[in-house]
Image (cartoon, rainbow, N blue to C red):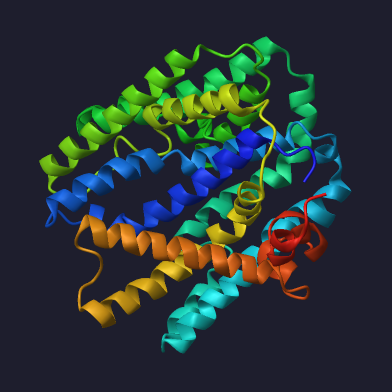
């Protein structure tokens, strides 16, 4: 519990809630039959878009600041297993669920492709994060030796050659796309471009003098408006959902995510933790992330059986479904964190560590 970062706890919980919403709202965003629900979903999906970039950014900020990150023994004894073991555990549960539903052939196919393809789409995040962990010892050594000018240069390369080219390429007519497409031997994407967010977190973490809060709030408001209105215009123009304004590798999402990160840091970095709920939810965020695809899948099946429709068709129904999924995921995570022999398999935390902040014992213990 000591040395907790209040701003990171807040960002982690908000990102967790945002990721759940993105996948709950996915069906509504791909149907234009319910305009009110679509517009509601579009706004909150755009607001939730920075969730994944922020997870990458917090990982980079914390790892590249910690001295132990350079230790290869620490990497393979602790860091990688904490992510890989829960991923494999939940992948196994997902495959078992597929078998129980009568899709044994599909489960076997998914198992055979596990190294290449996650068993659940949202798990792609971990397929990107684990390689970052693998090279984090070298990144740590590199980061420790970088001057401010080298940091600026490295981030500029990513912003120009990954985010910039990608954003421009999505807006120009098809016949001009090749002008803004770099040759594969010159590709600076760095693990699909997401490593840039990992490094961005470490880069922004070093900033002591932050931009004025009004400027950051203005950037957030403008980028959110661009994303919401742009997605609405593009989707209705093509009559199919478009992520041209909300893709993680656009300049819009980059600016929105960076501004949220800095604004949260500006307001909360020196704030002391209070209460148990925020540390609890923060400590459970990784497990909730792993649980939520399965919970949504089961929830949608139950919805179809009970109500006879493929999913929520009104704002109130979607909010209720989202709240139910979120509560179920949190309660399941608390439960799994509270079983000594199971805790590590599903959470990546030792039972002793979970008892400090994120299981039933942590909730019931008296304040010291």
Q: Residue at x 25, y 58 (%)?
A: 316
Would residue 122 be seen by someone viewing this image from the given angle?
yes
Q: Nearer the viewer, residue 24 or 118?
A: 24
Would residue 158 be seen by someone viewing this image from the given angle?
no
Quarter holding residue 145:
top right
Q: Residue at x 46, y 60 (%)?
A: 326
Q: Nearer the viewer, residue 301 or 317?
A: 317
Using the image, determine if residue 272 lies above or below residue 55.
Answer: above
Quarter holding residue 47:
top left
Using the image, determine if residue 58 lies above or below residue 365.
Answer: above
Q: Position of residue 97 (x, y in %)?
A: 49, 81
Q: Position of residue 17 (x, y in %)?
A: 47, 50
Q: Nearer the viewer, residue 45 or 92?
A: 45
Using the image, determine if residue 174 lies above or below residue 91.
Answer: above
With 21 as the anchor, is 202 left or right in this view? right
With 184 as the anchor, is 354 left or right in this view? right
Q: Residue at x 45, y 19 (%)?
A: 216
Please count the marks in the image: 0
Q: Position of residue 248 (x, y in %)?
A: 42, 38
Q: Position of residue 122 (x, y in %)?
A: 47, 57
Q: Residue at x 78, y 73 (%)?
A: 340
With 177 as the anchor, is 282 left or right in this view? right
């Amino acid at each position: 519990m000591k040395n907790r970062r209040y701003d990171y706890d807040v960002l982690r919980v908000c990102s967790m809630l945002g990721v759940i919403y993105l996948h709950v709202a996915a069906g509504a965003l791909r149907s234009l039959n319910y305009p009110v629900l679509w517009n509601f979903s579009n706004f909150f999906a755009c607001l939730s878009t920075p969730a994944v970039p922020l997870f990458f950014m917090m990982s980079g900020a914390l790892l590249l600041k910690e001295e132990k990150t350079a230790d290869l023994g620490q990497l393979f004894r602790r860091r990688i297993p904490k992510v890989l073991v829960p991923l494999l555990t939940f992948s196994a549960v997902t495959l078992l669920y597929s078998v129980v539903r009568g899709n044994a052939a599909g489960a076997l196919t998914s198992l055979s492709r596990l190294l290449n393809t996650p068993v659940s789409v949202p798990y792609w995040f971990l397929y990107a994060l684990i390689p970052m962990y693998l090279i984090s010892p070298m990144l740590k050594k590199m980061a420790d030796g970088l001057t401010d000018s080298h940091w600026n240069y490295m981030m500029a390369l990513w912003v120009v050659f990954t985010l910039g080219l990608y954003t421009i390429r999505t807006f120009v007519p098809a016949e001009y796309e090749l002008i803004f497409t770099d040759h594969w031997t010159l590709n600076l994407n760095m693990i699909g471009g997401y490593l840039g967010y990992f490094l961005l977190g470490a880069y922004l973490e070093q900033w002591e003098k932050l931009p004025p809060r009004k400027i950051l709030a203005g950037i957030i408001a403008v980028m959110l408006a661009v994303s919401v209105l742009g997605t609405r215009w593009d989707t209705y123009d093509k009559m199919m959902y478009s992520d041209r304004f909300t893709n993680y590798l656009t300049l819009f999402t980059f600016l929105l995510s960076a501004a949220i990160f800095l604004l949260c840091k500006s307001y909360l970095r020196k704030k002391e933790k209070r209460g148990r709920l925020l540390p609890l939810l923060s400590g459970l965020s990784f497990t909730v992330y792993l649980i939520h695809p399965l919970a949504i899948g089961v929830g949608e099946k139950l919805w179809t059986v009970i109500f006879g429709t493929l999913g929520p068709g009104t704002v109130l129904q979607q909010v209720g479904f989202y709240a139910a999924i979120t509560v179920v995921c949190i309660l399941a995570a608390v439960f799994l964190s509270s079983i000594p022999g199971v805790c590590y398999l599903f959470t990546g935390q030792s039972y002793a560590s979970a008892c400090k902040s994120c299981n039933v014992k942590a909730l019931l213990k008296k304040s010291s």
